[in-house]
Structure formats: C-alpha cells, structure tokens
C-alpha cells in the first residue's frame, strides 16, 4: 500500500503504508509519547503539540491561535541510504542521553560524530530506526514530527526508547519543508528558521529541565509547535 505521498519523495517500499505527512507533537524532547500519569512517566507535561498519544485535542485547546500553531508537517520515507532526513539515529553514547537534563540537549543530535563528516546528509556508523513506513502507526517514529531541530535536520532518539527524542520535519524540497497550520493554511518553513537555544533541555516537571509552563526554548520553530504556551509568534515576526 502506498498512500498519503508527496510527489517529491521517490521512495517506494512494497508492503508498507508509507506517508510523507506527520502529526505535530510540539517541542518535546523528553517523554513526548509516554502516557500521562502512567507507570514511570513524568505526567504528560511534555505533550505540548496539537497531537499526542494517550490524549485528545480540540480546536478549543489551541490557546495560542490556530494561525500560530502547526498541525502537521512533511517528513521523508526511509530510503535505505542512511540519510539524516529519512532515519532516526540511536543517540546513546553515555553522554548525550535525552532523558537526563544535562544531556537532553538537541544540539547533541544536530552535530556530532554520528553524522558522516564526508557526507553531512548521511549518518555515520551506528544504529538507525526507519521513519514513515506505516501511516496508521501511532508511534512517534512512524507518524510524528517535532518542532525542535529545523526542517531537514537530523532526528535522534535515546537508544531503546522512542519517548526521549527529536523527530525533525524533512522533505526533498530545496531549503525547507511544508507545514499545515491548524487554520488550514499551508506554509513553507525554511531550514534556517529560528530555533532558539538548542543547548537548552526540553520541558519537564523534573528538576534540571526547562520548567513546565515556559515558552518554548526553541525559538519561533518551537513556538509554532505548541498549542498553549502563551506564545503568539508567527512566521512574520
């Protein structure tokens, strides 16, 4: 089955329901898909986007305004070429685990030895996880994107745990990717969009992380991914 595809993505994988359109889960880095209040969770405070697992959202939940909030965005189907756009890297070298406040810094995914220095659009040796192979699968790696690292940047997850991760938007369009705003408008986001301070840890009620209720630490891109963080930043700001 092949459906929900963008003409710019030539990848064809038989037997998989591929898609190029991902639900936006906001600016989460830690616990972005854990059940709120479930065993071993931190309470769901990371679920700041229009979509999330284990909970539902309504238009009335979008307190920052539908024209200021991303509903969906593009991503790229795994193409067997170790591309940073189409795979998720298992980033767990003992110093950059996303689950620890001193380690859950997105900059660790954006730059590092896991990116091939001779081919910056490919991951170097290491464990990878495919993306966009099953459109009806609610797991983050299959059907979601986050507004942390800019479009066409790498995606990384804590090895063995999809909940602590960054899942970047991606496309084969030059210079960026399209997003669908909650008001129905389609916008093109450049890969040079402001992402704030990628050295800042994600939002969590656990000590050492960015405090719950804070505006996104990840600039305009992060603000566009949250539904109720008292942010009204737009692409025109």
Image (cartoon, rainbow, N blue to C red):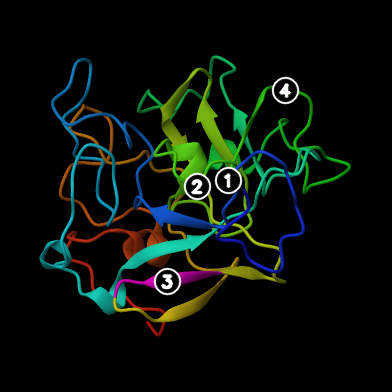
Dot placed on the residue nearer the N-terminal end, 4 or 3 = 4
Specify start and end residues of the magenta stretch as a single range.
Answer: 178-182
Disc number lying in front (4 or 1): 1
Label drawn at residue 151: none
| Residue at horizontal 63 percent and vertical 57 percent from the top | 152
Sequence-first disc among 1 and 2: 1
Q: Secondary structure at mark 1?
A: loop
Q: Are marks 1 and 2 in contact (CB under 8 Å)?
A: yes
Please tell me how crowded label 3 is: few (under 14), some (14-19), or many (20+) other residues with Cα within 10 Å: many
* Separation of marks 4 and 3 at Cα, in angstroms: 33 Å
Q: Is residue 121 above or below residue 230?
A: above
Chain-order first, disc 4 or disc 1:
1
Please state which of the two labelled residues, at mark 4 or mark 3, is closer to the viewer: 3
Q: Along the polypeptide, which appears first: circle 3 or circle 2?
A: 2
Which residue in the protein does label 1 denote? 17
Q: Is residue 147 left or right of residue 208?
A: right
Residue 80 horizontal side relative to residue 46, left or right: right
Q: What is the CA distance from the residue labelled 3 to the residue labelled 2?
A: 17 Å
Which of the two residues, 102 or 55, is positioned nearer the viewer here? 55
233 is within the stretch colored magenta: no
Residue 214 picture location, percent across and down = 20, 51
- Can residue 52 be spotted in the picture? yes
Residue placed under numbered mark 2 in the picture: 135
Q: Which circle, 3 or 2, is nearer the viewer? A: 2
Asked whether, in this view, residue 46 is left or right of residue 199, the answer is left
Please tell me in which quadrant of the rendered image residue 109 appears.
top right
For marks 4 and 2, give the CA distance. 25 Å
Between residue 115 and residue 225, name the one nearer to us: 225
Q: Is residue 179 magenta?
A: yes
Q: Which residue is mark 3?
A: 180
């Amino acid at each position: 089955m092949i459906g929900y595809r963008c003409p710019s993505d030539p990848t064809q994988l038989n037997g998989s329901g591929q898609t190029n359109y991902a639900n936006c889960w906001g600016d989460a880095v830690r616990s972005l898909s854990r059940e709120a209040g479930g065993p071993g969770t931190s309470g769901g405070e990371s679920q700041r986007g229009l979509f999330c697992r284990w909970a539902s959202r309504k238009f009335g939940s979008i307190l920052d305004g539908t024209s200021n909030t991303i509903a969906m965005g593009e991503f790229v189907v795994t193409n067997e070429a170790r591309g940073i756009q189409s795979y998720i890297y298992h980033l767990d070298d003992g110093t950059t685990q996303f689950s620890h406040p001193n380690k859950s810094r997105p900059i660790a995914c954006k730059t590092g030895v896991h990116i091939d220095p001779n081919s910056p659009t490919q991951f170097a040796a290491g464990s990878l996880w495919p993306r966009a192979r099953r459109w009806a699968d609610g797991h983050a790696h299959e059907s979601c994107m986050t507004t942390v690292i800019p479009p066409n940047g790498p995606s990384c997850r804590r090895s063995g745990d999809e909940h602590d991760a960054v899942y970047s938007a991606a496309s084969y369009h030059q210079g960026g990717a399209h997003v669908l705003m909650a008001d129905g408008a389609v916008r093109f986001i450049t890969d040079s969009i402001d992402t704030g301070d990628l050295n800042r840890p994600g939002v969590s009620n656990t000590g050492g992380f960015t405090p719950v209720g804070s505006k996104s630490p990840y600039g305009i891109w992060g603000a566009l991914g949250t539904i109720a963080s008292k942010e009204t930043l737009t692409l025109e700001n």
